[in-house]
């Protein structure tokens, strides 16, 4: 994209830049704006009445889908024990997935949000304790230094 096109694009988003602005700054601002825009998938989901809950990657305890899968596996296992053949497995799986309703999903999301809040409080408490410990160490070091110069 040409520099003048980028300036025009930024202007469309309410950001005026002089033509002498370095391209690197223009691209940085454009990246910042793009990061705030919803993705096509997010826009499509919202259009159909769904909401998007962004969760931290690589933290399975913060993923509502993990709770849903656990419940689905439990239901499949219970039903499969009573089934008469492996040909029924797909029907059992589909029935189990279909039985996960909005109320169950809401409960899983509420659980995850509580877990995230609890982790944030724990992290804050740890940070505060580390700061307190650091302050105590600084006071000890300062008192030792004062003794050396007395």
Image (tube, rainbow, N blue to C red):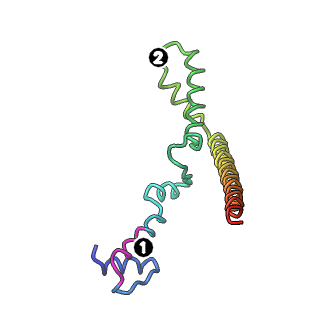
- The residue at 41%/81% (across/down) is 11
- The residue at 31%/81% (across/down) is 4
Asked whether residue 61 is in view, the answer is yes
Image mark for residue 29: 1
> In the image shown, does 144 or 124 lie closer to the viewer?
144
In the rendered structure, does residue 55 fall within the stretch colored magenta?
Answer: no
**Which quadrant of the figure has residue 77?**
top right
Q: Is residue 149 left or right of residue 56?
A: right
Q: Position of residue 121 (x, y in %)?
A: 69, 51
Examine the residues drawn in magenta and state their main secondary structure. helix
Residue under pointer 2: 86
**Which quadrant of the figure has residue 1?**
bottom left
Q: CA distance from mark 1 to mark 2?
A: 57 Å
Q: Residues within 10 Å of mark 2 (few under 14, many from 20)?
A: few
Image mark for residue 143: none
Q: Is residue 82 above or below residue 36?
A: above
The kind of secondary structure element at disc 1 is helix
Residue at the outermost front position: 150
Q: The C terminus lies in which quarter of the figure? A: bottom right
Asked whether residue 50 is in view, the answer is no
- The residue at 55%/29% (across/down) is 95
- Magenta part of the chain: 21-31
Sequence-wise first label, 1 or 2: 1
């Amino acid at each position: 994209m040409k520099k003048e096109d980028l300036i025009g694009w930024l202007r469309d988003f309410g950001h005026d830049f002089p033509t002498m602005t370095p391209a690197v700054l223009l691209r940085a601002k454009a990246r910042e704006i793009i990061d705030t825009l919803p993705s096509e998938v997010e826009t499509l989901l919202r259009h159909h009445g769904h909401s998007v809950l962004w969760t931290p990657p690589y933290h399975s305890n913060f993923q509502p889908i993990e709770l849903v899968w656990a419940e689905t596996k439990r239901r499949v296992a219970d039903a499969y024990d009573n089934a008469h053949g492996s040909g029924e497995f797909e029907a059992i799986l589909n029935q189990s997935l279909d039985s996960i309703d909005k109320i169950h999903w809401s409960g899983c999301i509420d659980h995850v949000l509580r877990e995230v809040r609890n982790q944030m409080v724990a992290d804050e408490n740890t940070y505060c304790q580390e700061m307190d410990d650091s302050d105590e160490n600084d006071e000890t070091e300062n008192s030792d230094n004062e003794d050396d110069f007395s």
